[in-house]
Amino acid sequence: MFKKRNIKLYFVFYKSFWFFSTVISILCAFYLMSDGASIYAPLFWFKIGTLAFVFYYIRAYKAKEFLFYKNLGISRRALWVFSFSFDMIIYFVLVIIALKVHAKFT
C-alpha cells in the first residue's frame, strides 16, 4: 500500500491541507495545556469533525487531482489513509506534549 517511491506523492497530497490541520492540532494542544485532560473528549471530536470537513472540501474542490494520483498507481483510499494517519500522529504527539506541560505546571 505505502511504497517507498510513493511517499513523496503522499506528502504532496497532504500538503494541500497540512496548514489547516496543523493549526487545529496546535489549538487543541493549547486548550489542553491550559485546561487539562478534562477537555480532551470535546477536542478530540472537534479534530475528527475538522478532518471530515477537510475530506469533503478536498474531495469537492480537488477532484481532478485524484486522477493524477490514480495514473501514478495511488488510490484515493491510500491517499486518505496516509494523510489522516499522519495528521493524527501529529495531533497525538502534540496532545501528549500539552498534557505533560499541563501536569508540570499545575
Image: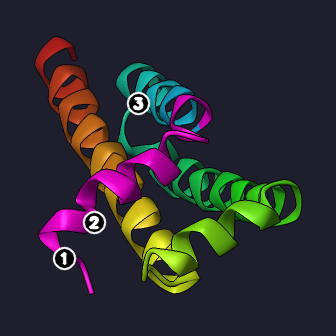
Residue at 41 percent of width and 30 percent of height: 29
Residue at 19 percent of width and 31 percent of height: 97
- Region in magenta: 1-20
Q: Quadrant of the N terminus?
A: bottom left
Task: Tell me which label, 3 or 1, sits earlier in the chain.
Answer: 1
For the residues labelled 3 and 2, say whether their Cβ atoms are less than 8 Å apart. no
What is the secondary structure assignment of the residue under circle 2? Answer: helix
Nearer the observer, 45 or 56: 56
Q: Residue furthest top?
A: 105
Is residue 8 depicted above or below 64 in this figure?
A: above
Is residue 18 depicted above or below 67 in this figure?
A: above
Q: Quadrant of the C terminus?
A: top left
Residue at 27 percent of width and 66 percent of height: 6
What is the secondary structure assignment of the residue under circle 1? Answer: loop
Q: Which residue is mark 1?
A: 3
Is residue 60 depicted above or below 18 in this figure?
A: below
For the residues labelled 1 and 2, say whether their Cβ atoms are less than 8 Å apart. yes
Task: Tell me which label, 3 or 2, sits earlier in the chain.
Answer: 2
Q: State left or right for residue 55 relative to residue 41.
A: right
Q: Which residue is mark 2?
A: 6
Tell me the kind of residue under disc 2. Asn
Magenta segment: does it hold 11?
yes
Residue 74 image-quadrant placement: bottom left
Q: Which mark is residue 18?
A: none
Magenta segment: does it hold 21?
no
Q: Badge 3, how many Cα within 10 Å: few under 14, some, many 20+?
A: many
Q: Which residue is mark 3?
A: 29
